[in-house]
Every structure is written in structure tokens, then in C-alpha cells.
Amino acid sequence: MPGINVLAGISIALLLLSTCSALYEDQIKKFDWRSVHVGALKQSRVDLNHFQPRLLVSTHEDVVALLCPKTGAIMWRQVLEQKPRGDIKLLQVSGFSVDSSETAAAPIGKNLGFDMLTVQGHAPALVRGWNTNIGTIEWEWSIMPLNSEKAQDAVWFYSNSILYHIVPAWRSHLEVTGYFASSGHSTGSTSKIMASWITKETCTLSGTFYVCVDGKQLISLDLVSKSTQVIRTALETEPQGTIEAVEGLNGVVIVDGKLVSVNKDQAVCTALQGASYAVGSFNYRKIVVSAGLTSGNLKIGAVYLDNCSPVPELQQTLQFPEHFGTPTLNSFDCKLKRNGDGKSCMFVFSTSAESIVAVQQGKVRWSREESLANVIDSQFMDLPLADTEGTLESEMKGKAGDIASAFLRRISTQAVQIRSLFLHVIGLGPPPTDTQRAGLVRDSFGLHKMLVLLTRNGKIFGIDNISGKHHWQLYLPKVNSFDNAEQMRLVVQRTAKHFPLQPLCAIVAKNSVNGNGVLYRFNPITGLATEGGLLQLDFKIKQLSLLAETEKDFVKGILILDASNKVHVYPQHATPLANGMYLYTADVKSAQLEGYFVKYAGGQLSCTHIWNARLGGHNSEQQIIAVAGKNPIEHVHSQGRVLGDRSVLYKYINPNLVAFVTQAPDATHKSVLNLYLVDVVSGSVIFSMTHRKVRAPLSIVHSENWLAYSYFNEKVRRTEITTIELYEGKAQANSSVWSSLQAPPMPLVERQSYIIPAIVEALRETITERGITNKHVLIGTASGSIIEMPWHLLDPRRPIASTTQGREEGAIPYIPELPLPTESHINYNQTVARLRNIYTAPSGLESTCLVVATGLDLFVTRVAPSKTFDLLKEDFDYILISIVLVALTSGSLIVKHLASRKLLKQAWK
Amino acid sequence: MCFKFIIIATLIALSSCEIIIGQDELVDEVSGLYTIEGRVSPPDTILTPGQGAGSALNKEDNKWQVDVTITINDGEYKGFVREDGQFIISGVPSGSYVLDVHHPDVFYEPVRVEINPKGKFRARKVNFVQPAQILQVAYPLRMKPLMPFKYFQTREQWKITDFMFSPMVLMMVLPLLLMLVLPKMINDPETKKEIDNLQFPKMTNDMPEISEMLTSLLTGKQPEPKEKKPLPASRQTKKRKDQ
């Protein structure tokens, strides 16, 4: 036995050596880049008067970070726990306080026992103190509320070095507990304040005041005063929206765009009108700044708080780019030393498109695109051809006429080329187009592409995949992801292959107001709307699919199944192609699958329900947690696998096979996971498998004839990957065409499980142009690494006992634990925080696959699973080889000359 | 008697348990949540100065404490490192967890921390293949850097010594040396002559002239004079043999 182990070990080591395609150190940043994000802004504090100017932020992605106010670069970042535990409730920076006793103008750096503190979560609530200079934690304490359900709506505020925890019991009372901020010791018992008017929708906390709307009045409570007195403030009209607090003003709320004070010590200027407000100091006087967007212009105004006179120095208007969305003033600060002109004031905005925008002196100083922290779909688009190649392409495409006309065309294009070259040389040529000027021209290997990213809030980016530059961005307001946990989609309707037609992409989403479908068509190279742009559909989208290309304009139509099971095609002229299409839907909650058949007859599309399958189990507890189909652009190069005895085992390659994974709690086994492989055309279940005592997180990848999925095994408390391969057998039923309806034989199933010593967050297979290159599986781990795993290692045919057959097949003996060598981390130390998904796309080279990993950060690179066999190595030494060649030729000539001379001499002797 | 003994033993166990609780003030008996604590040793002890420059956010002034993340269950629970390397993870219910310390440039070995419902801690080495095997480690945890991550292949560099000692070159160079240097070392003139006579007359003859080859190729004729010359010679030898 030990002998076998040693052998196995050696063979593994050899295999790893041979398949390892690690990076070289000098390749860092050559074709990979990472962009680091913090997420949409929640709270921020600009502090320009600190010895080191700083911008502290907390975000909706549960991140606290320090940004440089000059550039917006991240100085440090701490990624906190995921929601609900990490949900940041309060960010309190020392020197800023809502309480009037510690105004913003108070001496900064006053020692309060902390630099910055955060409160997160509700059960337990974690309170952490941070050192803002270097970003390390200083102290931490937590409390566990007695009633964790009630605590969900709890709010916190800080006043006079005491942190108050307010737990509302709706329509009943408030429970207020004080804690010493830096130690966590309670200041006394919890006080209960009776307040029968409080509801979740109408109340907010403004400084130390708990303010609620009740008809045409505000009812508020001062939570720190000794006597809990109910303050009623009358309003002119009943407020339309919800009320919002103004940070920095104790007891002041915004009611329909106006400031209203419920605090008798705090006067406000009622004349002020704006969408958002912030409080700070200017010329050592407290001011209120308001900002609002009117017809594309951002207006910033300010008044002194003491006498309501305007501050003319800060009055400014600027053009606000549309793709940022609607801005909300989050915080601002002015330098105290350089007072008077107001030029040193910086305003930080958060926007509805999840950008962070810093405005100074009437200009956008910098902006951060934080919606990229939530990428939900991506596509790599080919760049347009250069002009010369374009004309060549159009010439090749021309309908084949007789020889004479073809020759004439050839001569004329060449004449045109020579003319344009001449014009270019003397500087009279036509100016290059925008895309050409930006360097957006296709390269010979198709490695340079436009990366189109769709983000969760409807912002779309066009990013250079090599330099990481944002070429364009557009924002679709009021769009949302679909029901049934389905995200918005980015689909490619026409690729860049059809010169001179421009490529075409479409976003399919849900209108967030009425729930109907939205279609937005745009050019992915320029980011401009085409074909009418935004199209509001008058039905709800249930399922969508792409049709084949039309003959006329090479557009792939979008086939949409609506909520009433009617089908629609966009654009209309592609409708005939929908004939004979099959669609399926999967309801996540009920685990029910339905299949439809689309027919086109007499100019009418009809849709017939043809099958359904219930995967819910006997008591309908099972819910679908993952659906995995195959990549539609995948090519399977080899149809079979050569066995040890030189026979061929044919792969079961069914393009209509989709994997469904369901999970349900179970009384005896804690949790049960089922896997179904369903042919979604015929509705037949090809294979199913059950795992007991296994739970999510589940990642799944499905390609060619195999499937790999990872899950957490609760029995042995480790993450495992199960792989499945399907084979038709030694004979192929029909080698030319696949039909799901002609009942294919049930496939042979090979399966195996492996232990993986990491938590898997995402799985994805590499994909190449023709599918000749080996397939590797990219594994994204919880620590943010992306590991390239050869399929040999995941192969379910790895023999348990080292048999000769297995050895001849080239299979490695089975070892339960998968090795994760550091050399195969394709993102080396550029970890992707909260890695969520990996997308792959083929490049123009067969050997190379383009990769983008998304999460809180973004990482773009490329991988060559079988090494770059179709490309000279980049370190290929041209000089050496030419020197050797020249030296050898000249050497042989010289030697020949010498030899003949010697011969002559000898002859004369 | 035996029964009594068991009771006493359990009592002792319980009391010792309580002592731990009392000492550390870590256990919130009401909530059933516990705090894991430990210390992370700085990674610079094993990092050479050149390494780690490209760490997390690519800031030179970034502290290692910010680069290190301490997670349980894929970020469900997290700990943050203080400036002195101490960390705590608070609010953890009892159970068995794998605690991962991750630094982008240095490997720290993960530890399995087990908290029983009574609040007793046990830390042991992670063994996924044989979960039953227990190798206990110290608690509070001490996380030491094990080795720097080696992400990169080293590029093959062209060195003159590599070239010189490659077998192909040796095979070519040594005979050449023998050929050129050995004759010079022989001082005796007679042997020299012999050698001179011996040496490659054939080779020079067999070497075709490039110009001849070209003309033959272009005209399609066989280089006649060369062909003819050896023929009489061979006849001669044959004759000699006959004689």
C-alpha cells in the first residue's frame, strides 16, 4: 500500500509539473488588472482639517474605508461581515457629533476614547472602534438583545461618549439602553418610553430625537433628556413622502424637501429648498448646504445657520453627467485655514447610480463607480476592424461575380488604399473615428476586447479589457431584476463579425414601477442607444431565449415568454425563426419545471405547454437553488475518449441538458440536496442523485458531457466537489445530428467526489474558440483566489486502484483531497474580495480564454489552459536566434574558404 | 462509591469550567454566544523585503494588520487584527468552525476551533481527509506565518554557463578541441606528417561546390568532371588489387 501511495504521489507531482501553467513574475499587470471597490455610499465624513485630510466612508456593501479626498483612491479598506451580521447601522467619527454640545466646529482630535466607531448587525450587535490612520481595529464589544426579532429595527445614536441603543416595539413603546462607547458597559437599566404612535414607515431618528409623522404633525421624543416629554410640531400640509434626518442637526428632519426642527434649541431656515442637505462649518460659522438637480444641472447653495443669510462663496452650479443618476449630498467640509473664497470646500455626493462624486470649485473633482461592486452579467465584445481591414472584409464579402469585375474591384480598392495612404502621409487624410482614436481597433489575435458589464442597479459599463479604462457608461434608471430570483440580462444580438453592420447588445430587465419588461438596445462599442433604444414592453417577462441569426441583418431575435404564456419576438422581422423553438421555465419556490413549444403559422406565433415536472419532492419542500445549462457558444471538439484498450467511449453531448439542484431541510438528515439532469426539450429526467446531510453554498458548472458542483458536507464539515461525466457508450446513436425527441439511450454515468480544502464561491469552465484546448475549471474561493484546476484532476474516471487500464488512459489515481498549488492561482495576490462569479469568453486565439471575476472587486485576466501553443512565447529571444543563424552561416562559409586554401597549400607542397 | 466518584468528577469538571468562564469574561451565558481570541504573528518574519510589495491594495504604507483577514464560514464571522496582532471574533454560537487567516502573500495554517455548548474551547489542526484524527493546538490561538506564497514560475534565463555545459555543446566542442589542439601538441615532425596525410582528404573532395550545385540544378546536367575523376581511381585500385 505505501508503495502505491508513493507512486501515486510521484505521478501527481509529475502531472502537476506538466500541467502547471503559472505566471511569470514579469507578467504581472501585463494583461491582468484589478479594480477595487467599496460599494454604494451609506455614510461619509470628509475631514480636510485633519493633519492628514481624510474621507471616511461606510457603505451598503458593509465596508468601511478611508479614501483620499484629493483623488478618491482607497487608503485602506476593511470588508466587514456579510449581511445581516455586517449591516452597518452607525458610523461615528470622533469630533463629529449630532449633539449640540459637540458641534462640528468643536476642536478636532478631542480624545473620546475612539477615533471612529461602527455599529453593525442586530443579533448580536457588534461595536468596533477603529484607528483611522492605519485602518486597524482598536477594540470590539458586542451585545445580544433579548428579543432578536424586535432588534431588527433597532437604531443607534451617539451622544456625549455614550452609545444609545433604541429598540422600537411598533405601536407600543421604545426601549432605550445606554452603553459607554469604548467599553460596552451599560450605563444603567433599559428605560421604556411609552409611544403608541410609532410605526415602521413614519418614524426616523434625528440626532437624539425620535420623530414620527402623525397626520399633519410631527410627534417627537428627546431620548437623552431627563423628562421624556412628547413634543408636537404642526406642519402646514400632510407630508407626501417619508421624513429624513439631517446629519449634524439635532432634531431636524427634512419634510418634502424642507427643513423642520422639532428641537426648540435648534432653529432652522425654513426658506431653504433642496433635495438633500448637509451641515458643516465655514468661516468658523455653522452652515447648512443644500443641493438639488434641476434639468441636468447640480445646484449647490448654502446659508449660515445663525441668521439664515446666504453664503455667496459656496453658491455653485455645474453640469452633472446623466450617467451618475440623481445625486444626494452626503457630507462636505471646508479647509479652515484658507477661508474666504470657499474654493477649498469639498462636497461628497452619493448618487442613484451608486457612484461617489466629489465636487469642488464647481467641478467634479473625482468620481468612483461603486456599482461595479455588484456586476450581474458580462460580455466580451470584439472591437471594430481598422479601416483598411474593413474595406478588405467588404471586398471578400461581395457576391462572387465574374473574374473581370472582381479584378476591377480589387484594383479600385487598392487605388483607394494608395490614395488614402498618400493623403495620410501629407496630412490630408480623413480624421480617425472616435473608436480608432481611443485605440479601440481589433488586434490580430482577438485578445483586445470591449468588456461590457451590467450592474445590479442598471448601470452599464464599457471597459477596455487590457487597460481597464472605462470607455463609456450609461445608466438605466427604474430598472430592476426579475422575480423568481432572476437577474437582468445582457444579451448579444449581433456580434462584431458582420462588418459594416455595428454590433448590437440588449438589456432585458423589469420596470421597477409597474413590473413590466424593459428592453434597451445599444451599440456595445460606443455605448450609444440604437434601434430606438429604450423600449417599454406592455407585459411581464417570464422567460427569454435567443433565436438564430436572421439572413437580412444578422440580428439574433429575442424570444420572450410573458406571464400569460404568450410569446413575442424582438425585432419583429425575426419572428419566423421562432418556429419550432422550445422554452422551459423553472419556478424556484415550488421547484416546478414547465416546457413550451413555439409554433409560427400564418403570421401568428403560438405557444403550447407540452410538459411539466415537479422536483418539489413528496411534500413539496424542495426549492431550486441552482440551474446550470451549457454555454450556447461552446464547441465540443472531441466526440469521445480513447480508453486503455484503444476503443472509444463516446460522450453524451446533449445541448438541451440542464442541471437543476434542489435543497430542502430534512428531519433526519438536516438537509437534503437533489440533483436532476433534465432534457428541457422533451422534459425527461436523464439522471438524478441525492446527497444527504449536505447544504449550500452550492456552485455548479456544466459543460460538454460533464458537470461539477461544490457543496458543504455537514457530516464531515468540509467542502466537497462532485463531478459527473455522461457517456453514450462504445457506439454513437447518431453522430451527425442530435435530437432530444428520438429518445436517446440513457447515458452511462461516471461520478466521483473530491475534498477541496477551501470554500468554493464560484465555478466556471474555460472556453475557447474551437474547443480543442483542454478545459480547465476555474474555482473562486472565499478568500478571493481564483484557482485553475485541470479537468484531469476532477475527472470522475480517476481509478481508485491503480489499474493498468487507468494508466494507459492517462488517468491519475484517485486521491480524495484536491491539491491547490499556489502556482495555479491565476490572480496571485490580487485577491477579489467577496468573489461572486467568474465569466469566461473565447479570444481569437484557440489557446487563450478571457476571464473576468466579479465580486466587490473586479479582476480581469486571460488564461491558456494548454499553454500558448499557437503563439511564440513572449520571451522568445529573436536576437539570440538571429545571432546564431548569422554566426553559423558565416562560420561555415569562412571554414569552407579556409579548408579550400589549405587544400591548395597541400597541393603545392 | 463509584457513583459518588462520578458526581465529584463532574462537579470538578463543572467548577473548572466555571473558573475559565470567570477568568475571561468571554461567555455571555444568557445569549450562548462566545468569543474566539488569539494572536497573529506578523508576516514580515518570513517575507524577504522584495516580496509583498504588491499586497492587497498596493499601498506601501499599508499595514499588514489590514491585509490579514480572519474569517469563519466564508465571512459569516470575521475578526480584525489589532496593531499588536491580537484579534477576537465575538458573538459566535457554539459549534465547530474552521478559522482561516488569509494574507495575500503569506500562508497561515487554518485551525479548527470547537466550542461545546458549555463554552469550552478546543483548537485543533484541520484534517479534511480524516476528520476523526485530533491533533490539538494551543488555545488562545497563535497563528504563525508558515511560508510565503509562491505564485510565480521563475523564468529560464540565458546564461553562458548553461550553454557551455549543455551536452550538445560539449559533444561538439570536445572533438573539435581534440582535432585542433592535439596535432599542435605533437612535436615530432614525422608523426605530424603522418597525421597530415591521414587527415580528411576525402571530406574536401566530397564537399560539393555551391556554384557547381547551382549550375547543375539550373542546367539539369550532372557535374561531369567530378563524376569522372573517381572512376579511374577506383579502377586503379582495383587493378592494384588484382596485381
Image (cartoon, coloured by chain):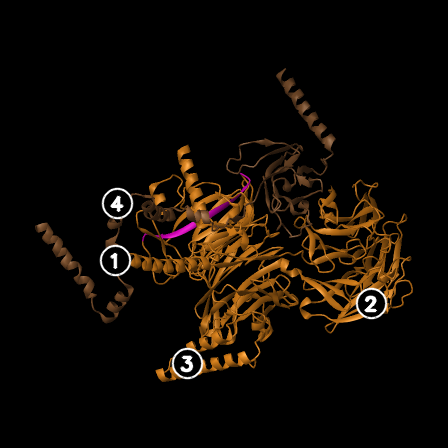
Chain colours: A orange, B brown
> What's under tag 4, amino acid-wise?
Glu
Q: Nearer the viewer, residue A695 or B111?
A: B111
> What's under tag 1, amino acid-wise?
Trp
Of labels 2 and 3, earlier in sequence is: 2
Give the extent of the magenta segment.
A716-730
- Cα–Cα span, label 1 and label 2: 105 Å
- Percent across and percent down for residue A334 are 82, 61
In the image, B220: left or right of A453? left
Chain letter of disc 3 in the image:
A
Binning the other alpha carbons within 10 Å of mark 1 as few (below 14), some (14 to 19) or many (20 upward) gives: few
- Under circle 4, the secondary element is helix
Residue at the spot of label 3 = A410
Q: Are marks 1 and 2 on the same chain?
A: yes
> What's under tag 3, amino acid-wise?
Arg
The label shown at residue A314 is 2
Screen quadrant of the N terminus of chain A:
top left
- Percent across and percent down for residue A76 are 69, 52
Task: Name the magenta segment's main secondary structure.
Answer: strand
- Under circle 2, the secondary element is helix
- Under circle 3, the secondary element is helix
